[in-house]
């Protein structure tokens, strides 16, 4: 490294540095964000060997906490990762982190890595898993996109094959999703729709997908290689309460092209309209009435 490069790295201030007042729950201790560090030998960093959950907080209430904690432990079981705490212990760690940061409306990121270990992918080379809780704010999409909707492309990157690593596991390795999102940005779009290995619609880079035809909603089944979304399940229930029919159905890109409406759901995204795919307008190219109604009903339900 040249002297000039060394100077650049020395003086550079990262604009994405966390709030210095933020306190992180790290293996049983609440520490300042600047001191919340893991080893370069942690297998979560070296190999993406770990799991995570994203959880919302509304008005001091943890949204769907039981479902998120359950999925967290199910992901761990699927990859043979022993979380070093009970579900009640994890919930207490989350509560302590929220209190330490005075978070009333925000976002929780819950992580567990395989832990520090030797070089090599064998799980027998890693020590005790590491548990991390972050409580902060999040804005997945710009606020104006909730008014105008998202422009999407179909990504060339496929969702994981279920017999590779099940997409129902929220693992720390989201590289194919990251590349799909980057592909969307490079194309001047907001988001990418990902297909499975059979060419059928799975989900977006980080959210589940619904389309609307008439007064009926359709969403791909989890067997198509997608996350079993907690917000997705809630929106399905919410839609029925609003008087709509909802079906799980195999979808192709063509189904999205000719849909009356389309929208994404997710913990961070909540409900957000998709107004175009591959430069084809969906409906009239604006967020539809049913999407708007579900957005309003969701806000009322979480309040």
Image (spheres, rainbow, N blue to C red):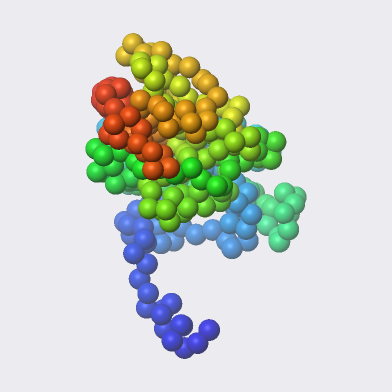
Q: Is residue 166 visible?
A: no
Left/right of residue 254 with respect to residue 280 in the rendered view: right
Residue 80: percent from the left, percent from the top?
A: 69, 38
Left/right of residue 111 with respect to residue 287 in the rendered view: right
7 shown above or below 127? below
242 shown above or below 181? above
- What residue sits 37% from the left and 47% below the top? 190
- Rendering quarter of residue 103: top left
- What residue sits 38% from the left and 53% below the top? 188
- Rendering quarter of residue 291: top left
Residue 174: percent from the left, percent from the top?
A: 55, 47
Residue 228: percent from the left, percent from the top?
A: 53, 29
Left/right of residue 243 with respect to residue 166 in the rendered view: left
- What residue sits 33% from the left and 59% below the top? 20
Q: Quadrant of the C terminus?
A: top left
Left/right of residue 170 with respect to residue 290 in the rendered view: right
- Rendering quarter of residue 99: top left
213 shown above or below 136? above
Q: Is residue 289 visible?
A: yes
Residue 288: percent from the left, percent from the top?
A: 29, 27
83 or 149, which is in the foreground? 149
9 or 264, which is in the foreground? 264
């Amino acid at each position: 490294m040249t002297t000039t490069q060394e100077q650049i790295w020395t003086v550079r201030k990262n604009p994405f540095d966390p709030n210095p007042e933020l306190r992180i729950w790290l293996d049983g201790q609440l520490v300042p964000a600047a001191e919340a560090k893991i080893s370069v030998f942690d297998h979560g960093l070296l190999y993406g060997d770990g799991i995570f959950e994203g959880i919302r907080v509304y008005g001091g209430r943890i949204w769907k906490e039981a479902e998120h904690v359950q999925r967290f432990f199910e992901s761990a079981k699927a990859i043979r990762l022993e979380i070093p705490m009970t579900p009640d212990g994890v919930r207490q760690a989350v509560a302590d982190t929220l209190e330490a940061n005075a978070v009333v409306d925000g976002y929780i990121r819950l992580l567990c890595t395989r832990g520090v270990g030797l070089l090599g992918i064998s799980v027998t080379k890693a020590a005790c898993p590491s548990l991390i809780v972050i409580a902060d704010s999040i804005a997945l999409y710009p606020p104006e996109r909730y008014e105008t909707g998202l422009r999407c492309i179909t990504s060339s990157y496929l969702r994981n094959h279920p017999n590779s690593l099940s997409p129902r596991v929220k693992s720390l390795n989201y590289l194919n999703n990251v590349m799909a999102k980057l592909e969307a940005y490079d194309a001047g779009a907001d988001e990418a729709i990902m297909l499975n290995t059979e060419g059928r619609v799975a989900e977006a880079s980080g959210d589940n997908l619904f389309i609307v035809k008439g007064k009926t909603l359709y969403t791909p089944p989890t067997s198509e290689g997608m996350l079993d979304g907690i917000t997705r399940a809630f929106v399905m229930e919410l839609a029925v309460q609003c008087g709509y029919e909802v079906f799980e159905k195999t979808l192709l890109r063509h189904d999205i092209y000719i849909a009356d409406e389309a929208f994404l759901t997710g913990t961070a995204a909540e409900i957000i309209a998709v107004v175009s795919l591959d430069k084809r307008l969906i409906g009239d190219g604006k967020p539809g009435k049913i999407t708007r109604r579900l957005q309003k009903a969701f806000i009322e339900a979480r309040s």
